[in-house]
Amino acid sequence: MDIDVTAPPDDACPQTWQVGARLTPVSGQTTGVVGLDDTPANTWVPVTGAQLALPEAGLYEVIADVQGSIAGAGSFSNAIIDARVFDVTAGAPVPTAERRVILLTDQSAEGVTRGIQANASSAALYQVAGPTTIQVEASWRTDAGTTSQKALWAHNFRFKKVSD
């Protein structure tokens, strides 16, 4: 919050000072990407570059717009990429901020190559008690078969303080 104080002109009579307050929203934004090809299944991995610092105590709107990509040849089923916002300071996921980005069930013939990209958005109101670091994380799995390429982009990871 900013406090504005305006002094009266020197020759004003009576001398009336004006005092006002306004909320100056604290905000931040970043982007990032992570390749998941070398990551074990069911392991949460930070998205490189998609980390933000919430600078002070308060209630924040946290939003992550993400895009996932899976490609593979042969038969596989339930190729999945999930994304979440994680509170690094507290060591815990931000509640309600996990999203399924891709769920691809494919039983195609061997030798057929296919891929898919999909987008998801996650938004949550998140209360913090002090300076806090948050990041976007990604995880993948395939229930059967293999996929050859997996990645997640955080196209727009942002926050805005909405209240103290």
Image (cartoon, rainbow, N blue to C red):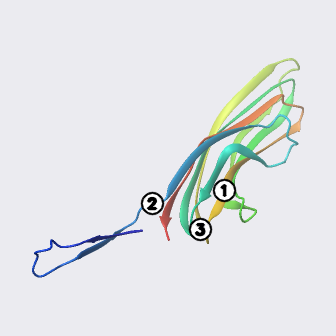
Marks 3 and 1, how far apart at CA: 12 Å
Which of labels 3 and 1 is toward the front? 1
Q: From the viewer's perspective, is residue 98 above or below residue 112?
A: below
Marks 3 and 2, how far apart at CA: 15 Å
Identify the residue shown where x is 81% and y is 38%.
78
Which dot marks residue 25? Answer: 2
Q: From the viewer's perspective, is residue 35 above or below residue 115?
A: below
Looking at the image, the residue that sits furthest to the front is 10
Marks 2 and 1, how far apart at CA: 18 Å
Q: Is residue 13 rendered to the left or right of residue 64?
A: left
Which residue position is annotated with label 1? Answer: 134
Identify the residue shown where x is 40% and y is 65%.
23
Q: Is residue 107 rendered to the left or right of residue 56?
A: right
N-terminal of the pair, mark 2 or mark 1, is: 2
Q: From the viewer's perspective, is residue 10 above or below residue 45?
A: below
- Residue 129 in the image, given as x and y percentages of width and height: 61, 72
Which dot marks residue 127? Answer: 3
Q: Secondary structure at mark 3?
A: strand
Q: Is residue 32 rendered to the left or right of residue 80?
A: left
- Residue 58 in the image, given as x and y percentages of width and height: 54, 69
N-terminal of the pair, mark 3 or mark 1, is: 3
- Residue 145 in the image, given as x and y percentages of width and height: 90, 32
The kind of residue on which mark 1 rests is Ile
Identify the residue shown where x is 78% and y is 34%.
105
Q: Secondary structure at mark 1?
A: strand
